């Protein structure tokens, strides 16, 4: 079993049931015209992403504020937020799959990830499955302490120093090869908004703000001040 996914799922398994806060989100993987940044920008308090992935029609984010879990669903076709800050909970599931569920109105929405990194969004209304899609571009929460992800591991909400030999690239999404939206020079201090791990490239990534630009920087290029 892949040690990264094993440790990720074990670290997520202890998250508790929650109460709804105001929307607070992260810009993780915008579409080419970048509308997905609308529901996914960090706005209030310290909020950490637990799970994020895209399907053919939706962008899904489960996030934690304190000990509470919430879910956002963004419709990529209509550029509309369908679910905003809905209280969620960790559902009973097999040891190889972690499932987060939110119920609003007559519909139950579940977002899941397996130890192999396979993700899925499922929506059931009135006992009927109305949507069931596999996901891609998944990133996961990273617990404080020892981690299988590469890079310095520290909690969001603190300034960090850029360690890059020259300038650290700020990217549109927490993955290698995503669009460069800006940069921060060596020894610059950036504000850290969120922290995720990308199982595909193996890095911890931090969402940071520097001089009005928000983007993602690899964890090996940052150090908390």
Image: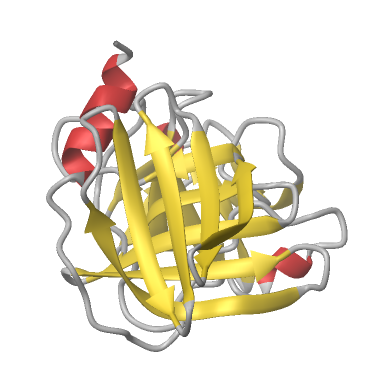
Relative height, residue 196 to residue 177 (above, below): below
Query: Where residue 209 sits in the image (x, y, percent)?
Result: 53, 66
Query: Which residue is at 40% across, 32% downward?
Result: 220
Side of 36 where 27 appears, left or right: left
Name of the residue lying farthest toward the front: 127
Query: Where residue 152 sits in the image (x, y, percent)?
Result: 30, 36
Q: How many marks?
A: 0
Side of 10 where 210 appears, left or right: right
Q: Nearer the viewer, residue 158 or 126?
A: 126
Q: Nearer the viewer, residue 101 or 69?
A: 101
Say which quarter of the image contains residue 85: bottom left
Q: Nearer the viewer, residue 195 or 190?
A: 195
Query: Which residue is at 21% across, 75% downward?
Result: 18
| Type of colouring | secondary structure
Q: Nearer the viewer, residue 126 or 162?
A: 126
Relative height, residue 116 to residue 83 (above, below): above
Query: Where residue 194 sits in the image (x, y, percent)?
Result: 40, 59
Relative height, residue 168 to residue 52 (above, below): above
Side of 40 where 103 appears, left or right: left
Name of the residue lying farthest toward the right: 33
Query: Where residue 153 sits in the image (x, y, percent)?
Result: 26, 40
Relative height, residue 158 to residue 217 (above, below): below
Side of 68 where 215 appears, left or right: right
Query: Which residue is at 71% across, 39% downward?
Result: 178
Quadrant for the N terminus, please.
top left
Quadrant for the C terminus, please.
bottom left
Q: Is residue 188 visible?
A: no
Query: Which residue is at 27% across, 34% downward?
Result: 8
Q: Is residue 13 visible?
A: yes
Name of the residue lying farthest toward the bottom: 22
């Amino acid at each position: 079993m892949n040690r990264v996914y094993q440790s990720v799922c074990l670290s997520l398994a202890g998250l508790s049931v929650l109460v709804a806060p105001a929307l607070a989100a992260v810009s993780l993987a915008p579409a080419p015209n970048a509308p997905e940044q609308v529901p996914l920008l960090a706005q209030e308090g310290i909020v950490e992403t637990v799970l994020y992935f895209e399907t053919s029609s939706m962008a899904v984010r489960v996030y934690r504020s304190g000990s509470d879990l919430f879910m956002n669903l963004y419709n990529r076709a209509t550029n509309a937020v369908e679910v905003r800050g809905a209280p969620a909970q960790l559902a009973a599931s097999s040891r190889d799959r972690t499932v987060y569920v939110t119920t609003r109105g007559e519909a139950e929405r579940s977002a899941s990830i397996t130890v192999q990194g396979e993700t899925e969004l499922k929506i059931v209304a009135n006992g009927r499955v109305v949507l069931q899609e596999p996901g891609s571009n998944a990133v996961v929460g990273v617990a404080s302490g020892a981690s299988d992800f590469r890079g310095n591991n520290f909690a969001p909400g603190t300034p960090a120093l850029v360690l890059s030999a020259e300038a650290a690239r700020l990217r549109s999404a927490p993955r290698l090869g995503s669009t460069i939206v800006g940069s921060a020079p060596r020894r610059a201090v950036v504000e850290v908004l969120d922290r995720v791990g990308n199982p595909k490239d193996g890095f911890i990534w931090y969402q940071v703000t520097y001089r009005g630009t928000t983007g993602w920087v690899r964890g090996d290029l940052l150090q908390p001040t």
